[in-house]
Amino acid sequence: MLILLVEDDRPLAFSLQTALRKLGYVVNHVENGETCLHVVATEAPDIVILDLGLPDMDGLKVLKKIRHTSTTLPILLLTARDSINDKVMGLDSGADDYLAKPFEMTELLARLRVLERRLSTAKSTKITIGNVSLDAATQTVIQQDHELELSRKEYMLLKSLMENAGKVLTRATLENRLYSWGEEVCSNALEVHIHHLRKKIGTDFIKTVRGVGYKVTQA
Protein backbone atom coordinates (compact mmCIF):
# COMPACT_ATOMS: atom_id res chain seq x y z
CA MET A 1 0.00 0.00 0.00
CA LEU A 2 1.59 3.25 -1.19
CA ILE A 3 0.68 6.32 0.87
CA LEU A 4 1.46 9.91 -0.08
CA LEU A 5 1.77 12.04 3.06
CA VAL A 6 1.33 15.78 2.43
CA GLU A 7 2.40 17.55 5.62
CA ASP A 8 4.63 20.60 6.21
CA ASP A 9 5.19 19.85 9.92
CA ARG A 10 8.43 17.90 9.58
CA PRO A 11 8.54 16.35 13.09
CA LEU A 12 4.96 15.11 12.69
CA ALA A 13 5.65 13.84 9.18
CA PHE A 14 8.77 12.00 10.36
CA SER A 15 6.92 10.30 13.22
CA LEU A 16 4.05 9.26 10.94
CA GLN A 17 6.42 7.91 8.29
CA THR A 18 8.37 5.93 10.88
CA ALA A 19 5.27 4.41 12.46
CA LEU A 20 3.58 3.55 9.17
CA ARG A 21 6.70 2.07 7.60
CA LYS A 22 7.14 -0.25 10.59
CA LEU A 23 3.67 -1.60 9.81
CA GLY A 24 4.62 -2.35 6.21
CA TYR A 25 3.24 0.72 4.46
CA VAL A 26 5.28 2.48 1.78
CA VAL A 27 5.13 6.19 2.67
CA ASN A 28 6.37 9.07 0.52
CA HIS A 29 6.35 12.58 1.98
CA VAL A 30 5.95 16.02 0.39
CA GLU A 31 5.54 19.39 2.08
CA ASN A 32 3.42 21.45 -0.31
CA GLY A 33 0.41 21.32 -2.59
CA GLU A 34 2.15 21.72 -5.96
CA THR A 35 4.45 18.76 -5.32
CA CYS A 36 1.48 16.74 -4.10
CA LEU A 37 -0.41 17.37 -7.35
CA HIS A 38 2.63 16.40 -9.41
CA VAL A 39 3.15 13.14 -7.49
CA VAL A 40 -0.54 12.21 -7.68
CA ALA A 41 -0.45 12.74 -11.45
CA THR A 42 2.77 10.82 -12.06
CA GLU A 43 3.17 8.13 -9.40
CA ALA A 44 -0.44 7.16 -8.52
CA PRO A 45 -0.41 6.56 -4.75
CA ASP A 46 -3.05 4.29 -3.23
CA ILE A 47 -4.04 6.73 -0.47
CA VAL A 48 -3.31 10.42 0.20
CA ILE A 49 -3.04 11.80 3.73
CA LEU A 50 -3.47 15.54 3.21
CA ASP A 51 -2.87 18.37 5.67
CA LEU A 52 -5.04 21.44 5.06
CA GLY A 53 -2.53 24.03 6.31
CA LEU A 54 0.06 23.90 3.55
CA PRO A 55 2.56 26.72 2.86
CA ASP A 56 1.80 27.30 -0.84
CA MET A 57 -1.95 26.70 -1.16
CA ASP A 58 -4.88 25.72 0.99
CA GLY A 59 -5.35 21.97 1.32
CA LEU A 60 -8.98 22.26 0.20
CA LYS A 61 -7.78 23.71 -3.10
CA VAL A 62 -5.37 20.80 -3.48
CA LEU A 63 -8.19 18.38 -2.71
CA LYS A 64 -10.47 19.93 -5.33
CA LYS A 65 -7.72 19.82 -7.96
CA ILE A 66 -7.14 16.13 -7.27
CA ARG A 67 -10.85 15.43 -7.55
CA HIS A 68 -10.92 17.03 -11.03
CA THR A 69 -8.72 14.22 -12.31
CA SER A 70 -9.32 11.38 -9.82
CA THR A 71 -12.70 10.69 -8.30
CA THR A 72 -11.74 7.40 -6.62
CA LEU A 73 -8.36 8.11 -4.97
CA PRO A 74 -8.93 7.78 -1.19
CA ILE A 75 -8.02 11.03 0.62
CA LEU A 76 -7.79 11.42 4.39
CA LEU A 77 -7.57 15.00 5.68
CA LEU A 78 -5.37 15.83 8.66
CA THR A 79 -5.93 19.26 10.13
CA ALA A 80 -6.05 21.43 13.21
CA ARG A 81 -9.32 22.89 11.92
CA ASP A 82 -11.78 20.84 13.93
CA SER A 83 -15.05 22.77 13.75
CA ILE A 84 -18.12 21.06 12.30
CA ASN A 85 -18.11 23.63 9.49
CA ASP A 86 -14.53 22.77 8.55
CA LYS A 87 -15.31 19.05 8.55
CA VAL A 88 -18.36 19.55 6.35
CA MET A 89 -16.35 21.68 3.90
CA GLY A 90 -13.64 19.04 3.69
CA LEU A 91 -16.05 16.19 3.11
CA ASP A 92 -18.12 18.19 0.63
CA SER A 93 -14.94 19.03 -1.28
CA GLY A 94 -14.29 15.34 -1.88
CA ALA A 95 -12.42 13.98 1.14
CA ASP A 96 -13.16 10.41 2.18
CA ASP A 97 -12.41 11.01 5.85
CA TYR A 98 -11.31 13.74 8.25
CA LEU A 99 -9.04 13.49 11.30
CA ALA A 100 -8.45 16.49 13.57
CA LYS A 101 -5.07 17.17 15.22
CA PRO A 102 -3.95 16.11 17.74
CA PHE A 103 -4.90 12.49 17.12
CA GLU A 104 -3.93 9.04 18.34
CA MET A 105 -1.97 6.80 15.99
CA THR A 106 -4.42 3.97 16.64
CA GLU A 107 -7.26 6.09 15.27
CA LEU A 108 -5.29 7.02 12.15
CA LEU A 109 -4.51 3.35 11.53
CA ALA A 110 -8.16 2.38 11.94
CA ARG A 111 -9.22 5.02 9.42
CA LEU A 112 -6.52 3.85 6.99
CA ARG A 113 -7.80 0.29 7.26
CA VAL A 114 -11.29 1.51 6.35
CA LEU A 115 -9.90 3.31 3.28
CA GLU A 116 -7.91 0.20 2.31
CA ARG A 117 -11.05 -1.94 2.45
CA ARG A 118 -12.96 0.65 0.43
CA LEU A 119 -10.15 0.77 -2.13
CA SER A 120 -10.07 -3.02 -2.44
CA THR A 121 -13.83 -3.14 -2.96
CA ALA A 122 -13.73 -0.33 -5.55
CA LYS A 123 -11.03 -2.04 -7.61
CA SER A 124 -11.86 -5.71 -7.29
CA THR A 125 -11.50 -7.73 -4.15
CA LYS A 126 -10.29 -10.87 -5.87
CA ILE A 127 -7.99 -11.36 -8.85
CA THR A 128 -7.60 -14.83 -10.35
CA ILE A 129 -5.00 -15.68 -12.96
CA GLY A 130 -4.52 -19.31 -13.83
CA ASN A 131 -4.50 -21.27 -10.57
CA VAL A 132 -3.51 -18.27 -8.44
CA SER A 133 -6.14 -16.16 -6.64
CA LEU A 134 -5.29 -12.99 -4.73
CA ASP A 135 -7.86 -11.57 -2.31
CA ALA A 136 -7.10 -7.92 -1.54
CA ALA A 137 -9.70 -7.76 1.23
CA THR A 138 -7.99 -10.47 3.29
CA GLN A 139 -4.52 -10.02 1.77
CA THR A 140 -4.26 -13.72 1.04
CA VAL A 141 -3.02 -15.64 -1.98
CA ILE A 142 -4.41 -19.09 -2.77
CA GLN A 143 -2.91 -21.54 -5.27
CA GLN A 144 -4.77 -24.80 -5.87
CA ASP A 145 -6.60 -24.56 -2.51
CA HIS A 146 -3.33 -23.90 -0.67
CA GLU A 147 -2.68 -20.55 1.00
CA LEU A 148 0.79 -19.24 0.21
CA GLU A 149 2.92 -17.73 2.95
CA LEU A 150 4.19 -14.44 1.52
CA SER A 151 6.08 -11.60 3.13
CA ARG A 152 4.53 -8.12 2.99
CA LYS A 153 6.86 -7.10 0.15
CA GLU A 154 6.21 -10.32 -1.78
CA TYR A 155 2.45 -9.80 -1.47
CA MET A 156 2.69 -6.15 -2.61
CA LEU A 157 4.87 -7.13 -5.56
CA LEU A 158 2.55 -9.93 -6.66
CA LYS A 159 -0.51 -7.70 -6.24
CA SER A 160 1.01 -5.00 -8.47
CA LEU A 161 1.83 -7.55 -11.17
CA MET A 162 -1.57 -9.27 -11.04
CA GLU A 163 -3.48 -5.96 -11.07
CA ASN A 164 -1.59 -5.08 -14.25
CA ALA A 165 -1.74 -8.50 -15.89
CA GLY A 166 -0.56 -8.36 -19.49
CA LYS A 167 1.45 -5.17 -18.93
CA VAL A 168 5.19 -5.00 -18.46
CA LEU A 169 6.06 -3.18 -15.22
CA THR A 170 9.52 -1.67 -15.15
CA ARG A 171 11.96 -2.19 -12.32
CA ALA A 172 11.54 1.46 -11.28
CA THR A 173 7.75 1.16 -11.20
CA LEU A 174 7.86 -1.94 -9.01
CA GLU A 175 10.46 -0.49 -6.66
CA ASN A 176 8.28 2.61 -6.22
CA ARG A 177 5.46 0.32 -5.03
CA LEU A 178 7.72 -1.49 -2.57
CA TYR A 179 9.97 1.18 -1.10
CA SER A 180 9.59 4.72 0.20
CA TRP A 181 11.69 7.57 -1.21
CA GLY A 182 15.11 7.67 0.42
CA GLU A 183 14.82 4.14 1.79
CA GLU A 184 18.05 2.18 1.38
CA VAL A 185 17.47 -0.59 -1.14
CA CYS A 186 19.98 -3.27 -2.12
CA SER A 187 20.66 -3.27 -5.85
CA ASN A 188 19.27 -6.80 -6.25
CA ALA A 189 16.39 -6.52 -3.76
CA LEU A 190 13.69 -6.69 -6.43
CA GLU A 191 15.27 -9.74 -8.05
CA VAL A 192 15.41 -11.45 -4.64
CA HIS A 193 11.67 -10.88 -4.11
CA ILE A 194 10.93 -12.17 -7.63
CA HIS A 195 13.09 -15.24 -6.96
CA HIS A 196 11.24 -16.01 -3.71
CA LEU A 197 7.85 -15.59 -5.39
CA ARG A 198 8.83 -17.93 -8.20
CA LYS A 199 9.91 -20.58 -5.69
CA LYS A 200 6.49 -20.37 -4.03
CA ILE A 201 4.25 -19.98 -7.10
CA GLY A 202 6.24 -21.55 -9.92
CA THR A 203 8.90 -20.28 -12.27
CA ASP A 204 6.55 -19.59 -15.20
CA PHE A 205 3.99 -17.36 -13.48
CA ILE A 206 6.11 -14.19 -13.52
CA LYS A 207 7.78 -13.50 -16.86
CA THR A 208 10.99 -11.54 -17.24
CA VAL A 209 11.03 -9.07 -20.12
CA ARG A 210 14.75 -8.67 -20.55
CA GLY A 211 16.00 -5.12 -20.23
CA VAL A 212 12.52 -3.82 -19.35
CA GLY A 213 10.92 -5.46 -16.32
CA TYR A 214 8.43 -8.14 -15.35
CA LYS A 215 4.87 -9.15 -16.14
CA VAL A 216 2.18 -11.67 -15.37
CA THR A 217 0.30 -12.91 -18.42
CA GLN A 218 -3.47 -13.04 -18.18
CA ALA A 219 -4.63 -16.58 -19.01
Image (tube, rainbow, N blue to C red):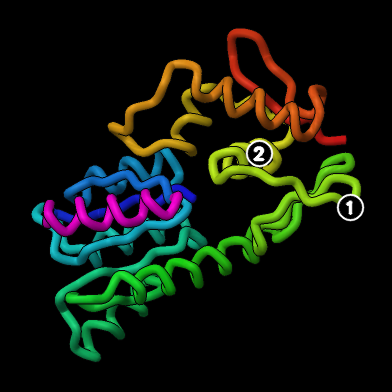
> Where does the image place residue 29, in percent across and percent down from the top left?
26, 46
| SS assignment at label 1 | loop
Which callout, 1 or 2, points to the residue nearer the camera? 1
- The residue where tag 2 is placed is 158
Q: Residue at x 35, y 76 (%)?
A: 107
Are discs 1 and 2 less than 8 Å apart at CB? Answer: no
The kind of residue tagged 1 is Asp
Q: Residue at x 28, y 48 (%)?
A: 36
Quadrant of the frame with the C terminus: top right
> Where does the image place residue 42, in percent across and percent down from the top left?
41, 37
- The residue where tag 1 is placed is 145
| Mark 1 and mark 2: Cα distance apart in space | 18 Å
Magenta region: which residues? 9-24
| SS assignment at label 2 | helix
- Residue placed most toward the observer, 128 or 88: 128
Residue found at the very far top of the displayed protein: 211
Label 2, residues with CA under 10 Å away: few <14, some 14-19, many ≥20: many
Residue 17 is a magenta residue: yes
> Where does the image place residue 168, in percent across and percent down from the top left?
65, 25
Q: Is residue 14 above or below residue 43?
A: below
